[in-house]
């Protein structure tokens, strides 16, 4: 005798124009963005590019193809906890535009 619960609308088909941002493990601001780049000669991996707009953190991580931004973020947090953020990311170009 229960009414059907109204389901939340799935939002998966909608494209988000705004990139998701996460809290930066280094400076604590919610300005950490994660994007992906394809690796030409490696179909099973892709390059995750992690950038913080506040402290200019910049990381490039090779991650499996199926990784999502949240998975990458988990890795970034792990690196931060281990104190390896600076090892993993070398500042290539600080302000490219
Ligand atoms: Zn930061």
Image (cartoon, rainbow, N blue to C red):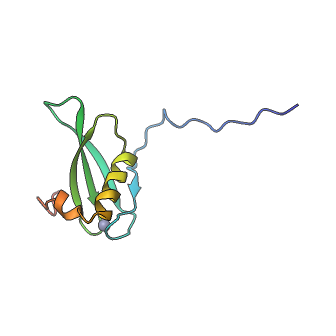
Q: Is residue 42 left or right of residue 71?
A: left
Say how many tags the image has.
0
Above-or-below relation of 74 to 4 = below
Farthest residue to the left: give it: 92
Quarter location, residue 28: bottom left
Quarter location, residue 3: top right
Q: Is residue 76 left or right of residue 97?
A: right
Residue at 17% in and 36% down: 39
Q: Which image quadrant: the N terminus?
A: top right
- Residue 53's x, y, as percent? 29, 64
User: Can you tell me which quadrant of the image ligand 1 is in?
Assistant: bottom left
Q: Which image quadrant: the C terminus?
A: bottom left
Farthest residue to the right: give it: 1
Q: Is residue 19 left or right of residue 10?
A: left
Q: Is residue 32 left or right of residue 11?
A: left
- Residue 59's x, y, as percent? 22, 55
Residue at 33% in and 71% down: 27
Residue at 78% in and 32% down: 4
Residue at 27% in and 54% down: 50
Above-or-below relation of 64 to 29 = above
- Residue 43's x, y, as percent? 21, 28
Farthest residue to the front: give it: 82
Q: Nearer the viewer, residue 9 or 5?
A: 5
Quarter location, residue 26: bottom left
């Amino acid at each position: 005798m229960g009414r059907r619960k109204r389901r939340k609308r799935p939002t998966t088909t909608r494209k988000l124009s705004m990139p998701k941002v996460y809290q930066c493990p280094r400076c604590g601001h919610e300005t950490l963005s994660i994007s992906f780049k394809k690796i030409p000669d490696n179909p099973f991996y892709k390059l995750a590019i992690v950038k913080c707009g506040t402290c200019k953190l910049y990381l490039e991580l090779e991650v499996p193809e199926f990784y999502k931004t949240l998975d990458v973020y988990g890795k970034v947090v792990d690196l931060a906890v281990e104190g390896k953020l600076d090892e993993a990311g070398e500042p290539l170009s600080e302000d490219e535009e």
